[in-house]
Image (tube, helix red, strand yellow):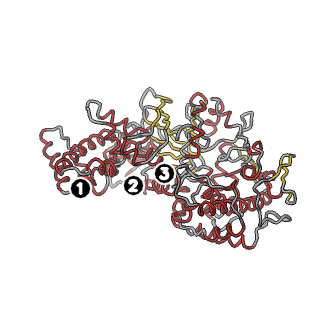
Amino acid sequence: MDKKYYGLLKEKFQNKENVVTEIINLEAIVHLPKGTEHFLSDVHGEFEAFDHVLRNGSGSVKEKLVECFAESDINIDELATLIYYPEEKMQLDLANQEKHVKEQWYAEKIQLLIQAIQFSSRKYTRSKVRKALPKRFSYIIEELLTESQQEPGKAAYFHAIIDKIIQLNQATALITDLCYLIQRFVVDHLHIVGDIYDRGPAPDYIMERLIQHHSVDIQWGNHDIVWMAAMAGSPIAMMNLLRICARYGNLDIIEDRYGINLRPLVEYSQEHYQPNDKFTPKLDEDNDTISEKEKIYLNVVQQATTILQFKLESQLIQRRPEFRMQHRDMLTKINYQTNKIQLNQQVYSLTNFQAPTVSTTNPSQLTSEESRLLERLMASFQSSEKLRRHTDFLLEKGSMYLCYNGNLLLHGCIPLHENGDFKSLRIENQQYSGKELLDFFEEQVRKSYRSPEISDDLATDLLWYLWTGECSSLFGKNAMTTFERYYIDDKATHKEEKNAYYHLRNEEAICQEILQTFDLPITGHIINGHTPVKAKKGESPIKANGRLLVIDGGFAKSYQKQTGLAGYTLLSNSYGLQLVAHQPFASVEEAVMTGTDILSKKRLIERVENRTTVESTNIGRELLEEMQALEVLYENYEKC
């Protein structure tokens, strides 16, 4: 027995009776039904759609209401909308209403919400419910939850509390807190399977929402890793994210909301580049807020950051031969006299190619002006308190993959050869593949992030490799053809060949082998994001006889024409797994006015014969270990 450990444990329990109480409490908890897990992926800055799906729990809130009020004739859609958007719904329903009508509305809704909370919190301990209560009304809500309005002796007490709340003009605030409490109880834990950033206009809002969430984990996506890499000191990652933000008209995220000074970059871009049709920013069809002047500077900034990215990429490729990316050193393959490039033994003419600062004798060399520019930009990035807080949170809550409740969550892929063997990456005379490869990548991410002042070490360069390397589990293709798509008209050169994983994952045996490699049961599931599911072409998000699920259906508006949907999400509760398809989200105003839920359909993936309890979850295993330690403490209490 580790006397020091048990001595510390004893300090938490003043006597043996307290130990017994805790053992009994934990024993009871592990026999409760497991909480609902909610899986989202590839939200790509689309905050309003993301926030709506969180508020309705991918339909879980309405499902609870249907169960709770099965014997009632209340309007479920109206009540659900109130729970999703309490402030907006109250403003809509109570505008211009007489005082007595408002008071009756308040009393009715408070009683319904209390019933819904009692129903949705049934599988939680009283202690967990109490801890979740909002501070300003914790005592009042606990009293309302404890005392039943159905008991004749307590009905007057129950209604007196509600009447006094209304009289003191606190009903609006209370109803708001009750609604958010229901949202919290309906979904116990949230998984974000990668790609919070890029394309959409509000990734920072999503990060703030996640920071406030009661229970969340994140599996890093390729777009997330670029933002983390920039804060870890990678100038090439910084150029890439600036290029993407310029491409989608989102530089205001960097400048206005993260407080990063882009004036030097804009001035540099305007001095050296002219507008080019190929670099016209990709804007939403309904986005008419960007002026022609802004479109021009987005155009030239995108061009400038593209060339700077290729210069820095060339430098990285030359100093990291072990990455085996020499075929992607594009600037060194150009004949600057003929304006042509040789790729794969073929010669192609370049179109729209402007590179006024590229030296024909040393294409990867930065000018002194560019070196100063990168230094200023990096200093501004790394001094952004808000961005630092967001990437710190990504590091704290995130990982390359997660084994959770028998499932493997990862954004992209496990790199495979065509025969199903794990593809390996050789670094410093060490081969990494499968689980070891992902563990190695995560170790390097954390190492680089700890030393943001170093920009060209192996760890920081590997963060860029994760964005574009052939053996990257976050990328999963043979090459990223950014150069070709910008400068070569022949679309055959734009093709990016996917890793064998993306067709082999249709085979159940392959998925089961991967699960076993991660010490998971073959009855588990691999949960992926990263690749939009083209539902309108008949593609299914369910692969390998249900062993693998893809939940990127296209939250990003730029994907929705290809997919025909606006995202898949996944629910795992004590009864099994459900896949949910979503329609595009219009606006909060429309959701409140019409009660729109944007759910297309729910699809049962797996139903268990007996409800899954906490005992069989990751948390349950921790509680069982804690119980074992407490039992040892109980038997040896006097010796500790």
Amino acid type at mark 1: Gln
Name the foreground residue: 259 vs 504.
Answer: 259
Rendered location of residue 360, percent (x, y): 84, 64
Give the residue number, with chain letter if any, for mark 1: 170
Which badge, 2 or 1, is on the more N-terminal residue?
Answer: 2
- Camera sees residue 447: no
Whether 508 is drawn above or below 13: the answer is: above
In the image, residue 315 above or below residue 286? below
Give how far across and how far down residue 448 sits, in percent: 64, 61
Answer above or below: position of 442 versus 614.
below
Q: Nearer the viewer, residue 121 or 113?
A: 113
| Residue 530 x, y percent position in the rendering | 61, 44
Q: Position of residue 208 (x, y in %)?
A: 47, 57
Residue at image location 59% in from the left, 66% down from the top: 381
Q: For the residue marked with disc 2, what is the amino acid? A: Lys
- Labels 1 & 3 near each other (Cβ < 8 A): no
Residue that badge 3 annotates:
47
| Mark closer to the observer (2, 3) | 3
Mark 2 to mark 3 CA distance (whole Å): 46 Å
Q: Which residue is mark 2?
A: 10
Amino acid found under the numbered disc labelled 3: Phe
